[in-house]
Every structure is written in structure tokens, then in C-alpha cells.
Amino acid sequence: MFRLLGKNSVLARFPRKPVKISGLPLGSRTYATSSEPKFISKQTLTLVGLISLTGYGLYWFYYPHNNYPRSVGKPLRNALWQERKFQDFKTSIRFYIDAINECKRLQIDELSDDYTGIEIKMAQMYEKLDDIPQANEIYLKIVERILNALKEKGELSQSRRDDLLKKDLSLVNKVITNQNLKETDNNVINQQLDLIEFHLSLVEAEIYKKSPELQKSMKQATEDITFVNVNDKTSNTKSLSVEPEKLKQFSKLFASFKEEYFVVRDLYTEIFLRKNNIEQAVESKMVTIGWMVLANMSRGQILLSQANLGSLLYMKAENMEANILRQKEQDTGTAITNELERNRVFLLNMATKYFESVIGNAGDSNRTKVKDETIDMTTLEAIGLSMYGLGIINLHQGDPMKAQHFLKEALHLSKDIGFQQLYEESSTELGKLQKLQ
């Protein structure tokens, strides 16, 4: 259950082409999409990092559309020729090294896109040779230079600092995803967490420096908010209330590196899941949602994160149930098991509220029909995951009728939007349910 979360990286999604939805009541809702199937990438967390690195490393790829001096352009052309014509990556690396040495001789800025672009291309050659440690060493050397530059007060303009932070986050993402994401060695996992924590703190400190007011709002978000309602509707739970004009101002602080920042934040959550530390994964996801609201991210992205948080809360409840069974076997007393059971019920209730909120906030399901209402793909994925989550919870709580209802909704929606992983999981759970009946 919930194999969609963590293992297949349904943690970070970005808006795709909107589809139209007829706003019928839940149970008779229909979804109209294009006939072309859309499948979800299994490596979502690498997407933004790869795009960013491509922007830094390949904008000069097609010679002569680069501004390099002739003495640098010549070894670059040779490097590209060896790579593309002969697939000779080792020889290509030698030419890239020649180009870098010439850049050093000409004293080209080592943090410029011209210089780091060559290094990134060299690292990509090592990746093609399956020499990941050497590739990561190059990326981390660039990161080290970025950190040294950011420490120099007053030397860089704010736009330059933002560009460097964007590049820094892209490189950190690349280093982590270059390593085996199925790594189980705790030492390696802890090193990855330390690396991400440091660079997230670096970015957040830079944001706070720009806006102490945002720092105050974020403190409120992380300490007081247990539930984020993106529509600010009245509910029994707390919600973050920030004036629209303030959100616009806060959002501008993220403008240069917003996507990279949230990809790394989701990668952080995924590593906690890999470590089987559900508590920290839940905390990380809640903090992420707070940041997403303050960064004025799209409603669909926030709803998807809420759906993921509901899944994490369910996973935590499952872990607690296993703990309850162990306590009963060890006969540790009813007081301990009763407290654990209360916590388990609380977590399931919270997960249910998140799933229900996603479905409720995605559109007005109380109206008989809403003509030509458009909902983006990210929102539809959030709805599908929430329906699946409610199905699993009701199945777990012994209500097969409700479970079947929600699982069928998830199955039909996932089929309509081409969410193959969700379709397979929903189909599997429905099959189990039918056997029980």
C-alpha cells in the first residue's frame, strides 16, 4: 500500500497541459482528456536538476554559437567531435581538460557559465563511462567555489547570488541522484542528508536576509500550522493566512531558484523515507508545504504535496500499528498500547482530512455540473492519489463499500489521465477487495 510514495517518487510534480473536467458529484465524476496517454516519470526528482545543468552546460553546445576565444573553441570542437562522432568519451575528456586549462590561462571567471559549462560536460563524459565518483567530484568542486564566492560579502550583486544559488541547488540534486537512490548504507544516507540540509539552510538564510518578515511567517507556518488550506476556507483546522500582496512579494524572493529549491526539498523527504524515518519525512513534507504557500506555488502543486503528506501520515499510522502488535506480544501493559492506539487513530484522521481537503479544494463537487471547468494535470494527480488514499484507509478500517467506491474513482481517473502507476495500484487493491468479498 502506498508504494506510489517514495519508491516511485510521486513527491514532486510540475504543471502539464490542462485537461477539462466535468464537475459532477463524487461517484459520477467524468474526466475528458486527450487521447494521447501521459505517463509519469519514475525519476521526477532529477528533472529540474537536469534541465538546469543543461542550461548551464549546453547553451554553447552547437559551435559556433558560443563566445569562447578561438584557443578555447578549438579543443571544445574536438571534444564534441570525439563524443558525438566516435563515442570516444575518454578522448573527449582530454580535450575538455585542454579547454579548461586554456580558460585558466586566459583567467576566465571560474564561476561563469562558460567555465562551469565545460566542467559539467566533462562530468557528463565520466557519467557515460560509469565513473560516478569522478563526475560527482567535479560537481562538488564547482559547489565549493560557489560557497566560497557566496561567503565574500559585498562582492556579488543580488542577481548574481541568486544565479549561483540556482546552480548550487542543481548540482547538489545531481550529486545525490547520481548516487544509487536505493542505497541502504546509513553512513551514505546520512551524508546525503547532511549535504542537503546544509544547502537548504544556505538558501533559506539568503531568503531570510532579503525578508525578515518572511522568516517570521515561516516560523508561524512550521510551529503553528497543522493543516494548510489553499483556498483559506473555514475549517476546524488552522490555516496559514497571508495577504495576496505579501505572497507576491515573497514569491519574488524565490523567482530565480524556486523549482530547484522544491525539488531538493522533496529529495530530502524521499531520503528520509529510504531511511524508513517516517517521522522526519512527515516533518519535512509539512515544512515544504509551508514554504510552498509562502512561495505562492500553484494550487495543484500544493494539493499534490498535501496528498503526499496524507500518504506519509498513513504510513506512520501503519508503523504505529506494528508497534502496538509488538507491545501486545511483549505484554507491556494496556496504558502504553492505549496511548499508541490513540496516536494511530489521530494519524489516520489527519490523513483522511488531508485527502478529503484535496478533493474538496480541487473543484466544487457539490454542483451538479460545471461546464468547461479546467483543472491542471498536477491537480488531477493529487485527486487520484487522495481517492486512492481514502480507499486504502476505509479498507483498513473495515468499510469495504467506501473503500471500493474510492478505489474505483482512483482507477477511472488514473486511466483517463494516463497515471499508470496509480492505475496499477488501484487495480491491485480492488482485486484484493473482491477476493475478500
Image (cartoon, rainbow, N blue to C red):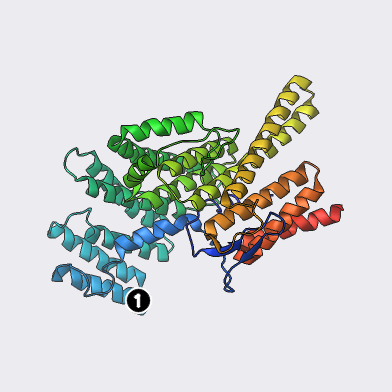
In the rendered image, residue 106, in percent from the top left (x then y), is placed at: 12, 60
Q: Nearer the viewer, residue 369 or 183?
A: 369
Residue 342: percent from the left, percent from the top? 71, 28
Whole-percent x, y for residue 295 in the image: 40, 44
Tell me the quarter of the picture where residue 317 sits: top right
Looking at the picture, does residue 70 appear above or below residue 404? below
In the displayed structure image, the side of residue 401 where residue 317 appears, left or right: left
Q: Residue at x 44, y 30 (%)?
A: 220
Q: Is residue 333 visible?
A: no
- Please report the residue visible at 71 percent of the width from the left and 24 percent of the height from the top: 339
Q: Give the left or right position of residue 180, taking residue 397 as reference.
A: left
Q: Residue drawn at (63%, 45%), measured in percent from left and top?
A: 355
Q: Is residue 217 above or below residue 141?
A: above
Amino acid residing under circle 1: Arg
Measuring from the top left, give residue 133's x and y in whole percent: 40, 54
**Residue, disc 1:** 84
User: Is 368 in front, or is 76?
Assistant: 368
